[in-house]
Image (spheres, rainbow, N blue to C red):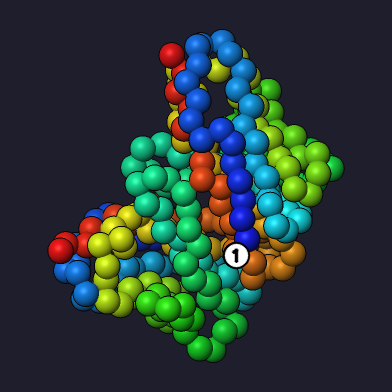
Amino acid sequence: GAVVSQHPSWVICKSGTSVKIECRSLDFQATTMFWYRQFPKQSLMLMATSNEGSKATYEQGVEKDKFLINHASLTLSTLTVTSAHPEDSSFYICSAIGQGINQPQHFGDGTRLSIL
Amino acid sequence: AQKITQTQPGMFVQEKEAVTLDCTYDTSDQSYGLFWYKQPSSGEMIFLIYQGSYDEQNATEGRYSLNFQKARKSANLVISASQLGDSAMYFCAMREGTDSSYKLIFGSGTRLLVRP
C-alpha cells in the first residue's frame, strides 16, 4: 500500500528553537498533503492543506507565520514550527493523497514535539 | 452541528467476539466518502476501510466491514473475531464531494479495548 514517511518521529528542543518536520510520499505522487495536530486523547485537528507549488491553505485559528508549510515537490512537504514554545508541544502528523476523490489519506507515523 | 459523531468514547470487547463502533454523519452533499482509521498507542493512523455514498454494497476488508445505512446517515464499523492487537483508537471520517480540497472531517474517536 501507499507509504508516507514522516521525520523526525520525536523532537525535544529548547524554547525559541525552530523545528522542521518532513513528510514524504514514498511510492506515489501526492497532489495534496495535510498537516494535523493532535492533543492527548483528542481527535486530529487539521492545521493546513498543502498543494504542490502553491501556498498552503490554513485552517481558521492557525498562525501562518508560526507554522510554515512548504510543498516544494509532489513527494515532499515540510512543516516548520518557528520559535517554538512549550504550548507548541504536541503530536504532529501529516497525510498525503493521490488522485481521485475515493482515495484515502495515507498518514505518516507522526512527530512528537516537546518544547522545554 | 457536528458533521461526524462517534458517541462511544470507549468500548470493551472480549477477544474473538465481534464489536460494532458507531458513526453518524451529517452532510447535504449527495457525493461523499466515509473512512475508518485505526490509531494504536504508537500514534500512526492506519486506513481500514472506505465507503462511497453511491456504493450499493457495504464495504468489507478482511475482518472489517462497514454497516452503511444511508437513510440513517450512519456508517458503523464492525470488527469480527476481535484480536488483542485491535485495541486502539478508531476514528470515523468523512470527505464531502463539494469540497475540492479533499479534506477529511474526523469524529472524536472511540477507544476499543480487547480483553483476553
| Chain letter behind tag 1 | A
Does residue A55 appear left or right of residue A34 in this picture? Answer: right
Q: Residue at x 54, y 89 (%)?
A: B56
Q: Amino acid at mark 1?
A: Gly
Q: Residue B97, percent across and down?
A: 66, 67
The answer to whether any part of residue A21 appears in the image is: yes
Q: Secondary structure at mark 1?
A: loop
Judge by depth and name the residue closer to the eye, B50 or B75.
Answer: B50
Q: Residue at x 16, y 62 (%)?
A: B115
- Quarter containing the N terminus of chain B: bottom left
Judge by depth and name the residue closer to the eye, A115 or A85.
Answer: A115
Residue A56, located in which quarter of the rendered image? Answer: top right
Q: Residue at x 59, y 36 (%)?
A: A7
Q: How many marks?
A: 1
Q: Residue B46, percent across and down?
A: 48, 58
Q: Residue A74, percent across and down?
A: 79, 49
Q: Is residue B41 above or below residue A9?
A: below
Does residue B35 appear left or right of residue B12 in this picture? Answer: right
Q: Residue A51, percent across and down?
A: 76, 47
The residue carrying pointer 1 sits among few (fewer than 14), some (14 to 19) or many (20 or more) residues within 10 Å by Cα, namely few
Considering every residue shown, the one lying at the far right of the view is A53
Q: Which residue is mark 1?
A: A1
Q: Residue at x 51, y 41 (%)?
A: A110
- Quarter containing the C terminus of chain B: bottom left
Does residue B75 appear left or right of residue A9 in this picture? Answer: left
Does residue B100 appear left or right of residue B42 in this picture? Answer: right
Q: Is residue A17 above or below residue B41?
A: above
The answer to whether any part of residue B26 appears in the image is: no
Q: Is residue B54 above or below residue B87?
A: below
